[in-house]
Amino acid sequence: MDSFISLPDGRKIGFAQYGNPVGFPLFFFHGTPSSRINSTVKTLHTLISHPNTPQFRVIALERPGYGISDPQPDRTLNDWVQDTLITADLLGIEKFAIMGVSGGGPYAIAVSHGAPERVTRTAILSGIGPLDVPELRSSVSAAEDMMLKAAEHAPEKLVAWINRVKDDPAAFVNQIYSLLSEEQKNQLPRDILEIYIESLREGCRQPDGLISDYLIFGRSWNMEFSRIRIPIRFWHSDSDEDVAIRNAEYLSSVIPGAELIRLNGLNHYASAITPLREVILYMSEGTN
């Protein structure tokens, strides 16, 4: 069910809840662009509905400027830490786990860093790393590099891109799908594509979320990775052409105790869905 939280500064944060309402709380941070409606979180909901599966109350939060969340000019990673904690307090949640997918990865790490007393475990699937690190910036695709540069120097280009996608999200998704190999197409059931279209329709309601995300991705995260003590595990595919596995390799090397599960042969979209059973089991270990 869609809902929103009213924050002390007057902004609204949109969210949707999935899974078991009395399960252990799990905050889900979507990719870029995306929304509270997401193929990963909907698959997660289906898995949790099966008997003998660890039960989670999944809260899919929309970052400012996405879906039904109000924009927040000049937002930072730390701003998202505060939004998440306020939301948790207003929902009566003390301890929670976190899952971040793709562009949600930096935000998952930020909350793990900024609220160690609240977070039990963190899972990151196909997550973006700190792109101010030269070895990671050099790994981005030409399309992603264009988005990063546009956010800094020509945000009107991102506004135009958002408007094109918003006008016909199905055409955008079908174009991406047509460029995949037959093997990669087989990794993505058609119903997943329909959810992705719905997610984009919500995620592209307004341009602010996308622009802010890319500004944050290209700048310093301003955190000491060596101080993170929350158990963090990364799942990332060696065939991910959208977010290179080098991002997870770097982060798992600088965060104490972090683990990297290497996936083989999966594209960016499939690698955010295929390992979910394993992810659920990992997250459940922190609920005892």
Image (cartoon, rainbow, N blue to C red):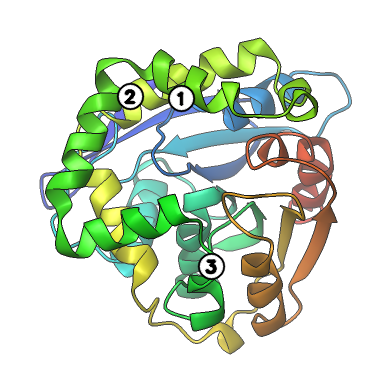
Label 1 belongs to which residue? 37
Query: Where is residue 235 shown, x and y percent of the image?
Result: 74, 54
At mark 3, the secondary structure is loop
Q: Nearer the viewer, residue 245 or 83?
A: 245
What numbered label is drawn on residue 129? 3
Is the Cβ of the residue at disc 2 closer than 8 Å to that at disc 1? yes
Is the Cβ of the residue at disc 1 closer than 8 Å to that at disc 3? no
Position above or below: 65 against 167: below
Side (left or right) of 36 relative to 47: left
Q: Nearer the viewer, residue 282 or 209?
A: 209
Q: Amino acid at mark 2?
A: Glu
Query: Where is residue 76 shown, x and y percent of the image?
Result: 28, 66
Label 2 belongs to which residue? 202
Q: Amino acid at mark 3?
A: Gly
Residue drawn at 85 percent across, 48 percent down: 264
Q: Amino acid at mark 1?
A: Ile
At mark 1, the secondary structure is loop
- Quadrant of the image containing the N terminus: top left
Q: Earlier in the sequence, mark 2 or mark 1?
A: 1
Residue drawn at 53 percent across, 57 percent down: 105
Side (left or right) of 278 relative to 231: right
| CA neighbours of label 1 inside 10 A, class few (<14), some (14 to 19), many (20+) | many
Residue drawn at 40 percent across, 32 percent down: 35
* Corner quadrant of residue 245: bottom right
Side (left or right) of 119 relative to 236: left
